[in-house]
Amino acid sequence: MKRLDVPISILVCTRNRPDDLRRCVTSILGGRFSRFELLVLDQSDGEESAAFLESLADPRVRLIRTETRGLARARNLAVLNAAAPIVAFTDDDCICDPGWIEAIVAEFDRHPEIDGLFGRVLPWGDRFADGLFCHCLIADEDERIVAEPVPPHRYLGHGNNMAFRIRLFQAIGLYNPQMGAGSRVRSGEDTDVTYRALRARRGIKYSPRPMVHHNNWNDLDAADRLDLGYVMGFVMVFGKFFLLGDRVAGRCLIERLGELVRDLAESFSYRDWRKFRKTIIKFGYYAWGIPLAVYFRFRGDMPWPADGDASLIRQ
């Protein structure tokens, strides 16, 4: 297929969620900005997602079926196959605002010095009253540009609404395929890449204008399991950088440990035994993140392949 001459490639990675993917893709194609390619990396076991995409017969849509597993591997394949100098990521369980792509392109045009951009993420609908929880949200309305090491999830945002210039990956490398959803670690790949960019003093902006809605609601038990994975991923990533001599990463680890200590003391004081047990388990996941940090410290990062060979991603 001939590659489109477009300013931005939209990258969506999916696995076995055809209904979510249909909503996501429909929202992207229905946006106000039309000069883009939509590259979908499909790791699904069945044919339903692929059949839907092929039925669209839209020249902007490119489907890549892959037998690889893991979000980081899918994202790497998407980046290496993108036609545009800017790539924007959203998740298959997100619904994009009609002005989402338009806002991303405008921000990069306005700030040629930045290499990355994160946007606002709001919940799709309101099911909090039903006792459900929606993760990976950021509703901050104050924009900012960061070009030094800080915790990305606090100052910038999340992987379900982010965009980068291709030149950033060429400079710092790709996503670590042993991190993220679908790997044993299950998290951390987007934090790792973003923090590497900040350590390299690459400018990354948070703007509330590019907006998506996250349609991933979980009950309390499922939300707790997600939290545990995030704790381990946090320690793994920032522990890795601390072992590389990064003092900011060390402070992040100490602050997170202090938060756990406070949660433990507070839950004991109020006899909130559910929270107490959950915090004890979090300490265990915090501890398990330490040997993972050592492993990734010596494992190294995934480099940008000199010849663009996507077979590297299968390692």
Image (cartoon, grey):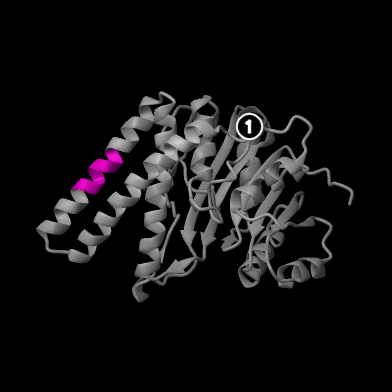
Percent across and percent down for residue 209 are: 54, 48
Please tell me which residue lies in front, 156 or 228.
228
Residue pointed to by mark 1 = 168
Percent across and percent down for residue 277 are: 23, 61
Q: In this view, does 24 lie to the left or right of 260?
A: right
Assign the magenta stretch its main secondary structure.
Answer: helix
Residue 48 seen by the camera: yes
Residue type (three-letter) at the residue carrying disc 1: Leu
* Quadrant of residue 61 within the rendered picture: bottom right
Q: In this view, does 155 lie to the left or right of 304?
A: left
Identity of the residue drawn at 31% across and 32% down = 251
Residue 124 is covered by the magenta coloring: no
Identity of the residue drawn at 66% across and 51% down = 74
Q: Which residue lies furthest to the bottom in this view?
A: 130
Percent across and percent down for residue 165 are: 66, 36
Q: Quadrant of the C terminus?
A: top right
Q: Give the residues in magenta.
A: 255-261
Please tell me which residue lies in front, 50 or 312.
312
* Quadrant of residue 269 within the rendered picture: bottom left
What secondary structure is found at the residue carrying circle 1?
Answer: helix
Percent across and percent down for residue 237 are: 44, 39
Q: Which residue lies furthest to the left in this view?
A: 269
Instruction: Look at the picture and state if 199 lies above or below 28.
Output: above
Residue 154 seen by the camera: no
